[in-house]
Image (cartoon, rainbow, N blue to C red):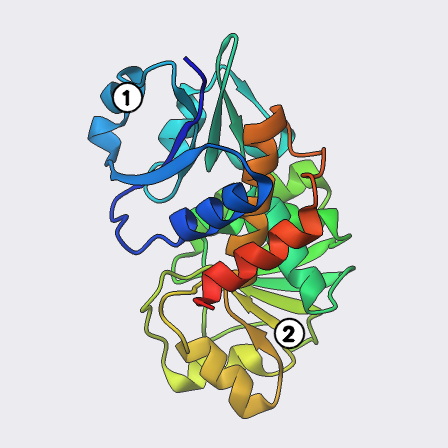
Amino acid sequence: MPATALEVWGDPIDHSLSPVMHRAAYAVLGWGWRYDRRRVDEAAFAAQLASLGAEYRGLSLTMPLKRVAWEAASRRDDRAVLTGAANTLVRSAGGWRAFNTDVGGIVAALGEQGVTAVARARIVGAGATAASALVALSELGGDRVEVVARRAAAVDPLIALGASLGVHVTAAGFAEVDPEPQDVTIATLPGGANLPEAAADALADAGGPLLDVVYGHWPTDLSRAWERAGLPAQNGAAMLLHQAVLQIRAFATGDVIEPLPRETEVVAVMRRALVGD
């Protein structure tokens, strides 16, 4: 049986835009693959994964499954190893291979803003996506990163990760951010997170361009602050797009390095599907 079935799993999942992007790409490529969504929580993940037949080529994973997907893999790419999170599983001869394509999605999304190298940067939020943001900043040359979070203890794993990457990571509260100019700010707060206007404005002041990973709740409190400051702000749609391109590469070849056939055209079609054109 050919392995042509793929799905995106998470909880909640109805909001996911992955199916429209992936289906658009497969249509352009002429691949007879199907891509669906399935609501799966952490408790059900192992049983659901074990139930998949040989027709399943791979999975996209969203919250809250990125850690359990990482644990289920027999092999992991370097970015998944560093972050302890996987948003992609690809069936291989030895089991499932895990990838973290969020890191590459962030790097590409920042590139669309003209941010191709950084020194000083800020991450807002210390959740799962913050580790991917930190690795992405490291790949862009960042060596000093401030992580703004409500609890200083939440930043401890990122400080340890930064040390392994050669990045000096410091923790700050929302009322005590570093006034020095930043090359870029990456916000990893969940959609709908509320910030007092004064705190958001303090982050925008000398914050550089903003990449807010939210794409379903826009504008955010942070993006409004960036608008007030006259600074550019980008939502997470470009990150979502580019991480999906890397996922399709992994589904096709078992790695994220080899470009897709007609990849420029594929990306354009996926972008149009993402915005509903």
The Cα atoms of the two marked residues, 2 and 1, are separated by: 40 Å
User: Taking 273 as reference, is 49 above or below it?
Assistant: above
Between residues 267 and 210, which one lies in front from this camera angle?
267
Residue drawn at the location 48% of the way across and 33% of the way down: 88
User: Taking 102 as reference, is 34 above or below it?
Assistant: above
Residue extending farthest to the top is 94
Q: Position of residue 36 (x, y in %)?
A: 33, 39
Amino acid under label 2?
Answer: Pro
Amino acid under label 1?
Answer: Ala
Residue drawn at the location 69% of the way across and 75% of the way down: 180
Numbered disc in front, either 2 or 1: 1
For marks 2 and 1, the one nearer the N-term is 1
Q: Which mark is residue 46?
A: 1
Name the residue tied to disc 2.
209
Q: Position of residue 164 (x, y in %)?
A: 67, 36
Residue drawn at the location 46% of the way across and 38% of the way down: 87
Q: Position of residue 207 (x, y in %)?
A: 62, 76
Residue drawn at the location 72% of the way across and 33% of the way down: 258
Asked whether residue 96 is in view, the answer is yes
